[in-house]
Amino acid sequence: MSDIQACSGASPNSRASVMPSLLAGRYRIERELGAGGMGVVYRARDLLHEQFGEPESSVALKVLGEAFSQATDGHVLLYSEFALTRRLLHERVIRAYSFEVDTACEVAFYTMELMTGMTLDRLLLECPGGLPWHELQPIAVGLLDALRYTHQQGVLHGDVKPGNVMVGDQGLRLFDFGLGQTVEQVSVGLPGLNRSRFNAWTPSYAAPELFDGAPLAASADLYAVACVLYELAQGRCASDGHLTNRSAARWSSPGELPRHCWSALRTAMDSDPHRRTVTIGELREVMGGARSGIQRWLKLRGSTQPTKS
């Protein structure tokens, strides 16, 4: 089938239609890499870069999934995700390259760094009992580094979960900012997409207050990343997805996790955002084994939870 034939009769960004083999006269689609609730990611070759002799011409290319392509503001949603990702330049965050529209096929898409490796949900399938501490620690530190950086740049991720973190030869990458927002959008109430209408929160990792209509906040990202780290250590989710079954009393110190790490992690997983008194930066220092971070955390615990004689 020719490239023109592949475009004919295709509805914009619909997976039900045949995906064009060439987009914008430049990106040769090779295969599908994965599909999530909002989009589909393909591996593609950048023919322009190939023509100029670039040794690495492969990219990841994201389009909207069929359900979201039917929304009148679907392309705006995709651009919003691209714009949030583009403002982030960190070795632990996926790099976005460009947003484009193939006008002939009416397909909006953006390109980004192509990662090789596996997502954390795939890793958990291979390690059902959880990861040993020497394997978990660098993943925890890398993920917390990425999240701390995004918050410093005024970006809230909104959907931290194992399927949105990849580890491989290039290290760890946090990706998929489709549910993300800027701090300015949240605090000032600037106009934006109403993401709640998509019912896209993942119950096992989304902070409980989000389901009650609370705005996205750094404490929600903190809750989500703590749930991910707990699952990596324990081999199972802290929550079974039921919002009424999130009592901290049912959690036990997971696997080989050091005691001081568990204290900070359990605080970060509190269902009440006002009781999540540890920050992502403090959690990173504790998980990283920094003596200063541990001492600060222990001092905080001592000031809020006096030791009984």
Image (cartoon, rainbow, N blue to C red):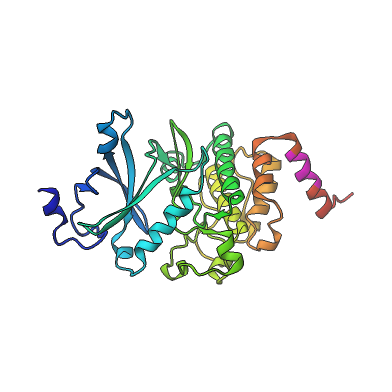
User: Can residue 288 be seen in this snapshot?
Assistant: yes
Q: Is residue 200 left or right of residue 252?
A: left
Q: Is residue 54 left or right of residue 153?
A: left
The stretch in magenta equals 293-299
Residue 67 vertical position relative to residue 228 in the rendered view, above or below: below
- Taking the spot 59% from the left edge, 38% from the top edge, the residue there is 141
- Taking the spot 35% from the left edge, 62% from the top edge, the residue there is 75
Residue 169 vertical position relative to residue 102 in the rendered view, above or below: above
Residue 221 vertical position relative to residue 232 in the rendered view, above or below: below
Residue 232 x/y as whole percent: 53, 43
Quick check: is 44 in the magenta stretch? no
Quick check: is 298 in the magenta stretch? yes
- Taking the spot 81% from the left edge, 45% from the top edge, the residue there is 299
Residue 81 x/y as whole percent: 43, 55
Q: Is residue 209 left or right of residue 128?
A: right
Q: Which residue occupies the extreme front position in the image?
A: 52
Q: Is residue 100 left or right of residue 144?
A: left
Residue 267 x/y as whole percent: 68, 53
User: Can residue 245 be seen in this snapshot?
Assistant: no
Residue in the foreground of this view, choosing between 68 and 123: 68
- Taking the spot 76% from the left edge, 37% from the top edge, the residue there is 292
